[in-house]
Image (spheres, rainbow, N blue to C red):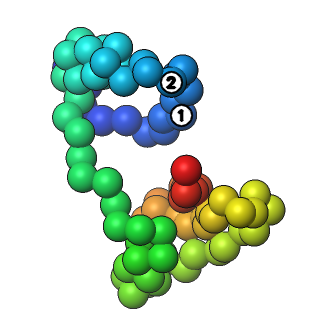
Amino acid sequence: MVDGLDHVRLAMPRGGEERAWAYFGGLLGLVELEKPAALDGLARRLGEGGYAVQWDGALSPRRRFYGEDPFGNRIEFIEP
């Protein structure tokens, strides 16, 4: 089974959830994690934890910010 993932970016057509569950949950054995708090709450938690966030309004009205993990990897956080 999969021990962990470094980076994932997925695209699927509407209505593909059942097939996605069968593949990622069934075949790969991945488990669903609780979705993080709303974007503002997540940014606040990161800041309180000592991790800077950089907001980017280029996709307005969609909101997004960037941050880094403890190893310097850049992570994009974006609202649907």
Residue 76: percent from the left, percent from the top?
Answer: 58, 56
- The residue lying at 55 percent from left, 79 percent from top is 52
70 with respect to 13 (left or right): left
Q: How many marks?
A: 2
Image coordinates for residue 65, horizontal then vertical, percent: 61, 66
Which residue in the rendered view is the most extreme toward the right?
Answer: 58
Residue 73 visible in the snapshot:
yes
Amino acid residing under circle 1: Arg
Q: What quarter of the picture does the N terminus occupy? A: top left
Q: Earlier in the sequence, mark 1 or mark 2?
A: 1
Kind of element beneath mark 1: loop
Callout 2 amino acid: Arg
Q: Position of residue 55 (x, y in %)?
A: 66, 73
Q: Residue furthest bottom?
A: 48
SS for tag 2?
A: loop
Residue 13 higher or lower than 70, as above or below: above
Q: Is residue 8 above or below residue 39?
A: above
Which numbered disc covers residue 14? 2
Q: Is residue 72 visible?
A: no
- Nearer the camera: disc 1 or disc 2: 2
Figure quadrant of residue 22: top left
Q: Residues within 10 Å of mark 2 (few under 14, many from 20)?
A: few
**Residue 10 position within the rendered picture, expressed as x and y whole percent measured from the top left:** 52, 29
Q: Which residue is mark 1?
A: 9
- Looking at the image, which residue sits at the far front? 15
Question: What is the distance, in whole Å, between disc 1 and disc 2 at their CAs?
Answer: 16 Å
Q: Residue at x 55, y 50 (%)?
A: 80
Residue plotted at (75% across, 68% down): 57
Q: Determine whether, in the image, residue 39 is placed left or right of residue 27.
A: right
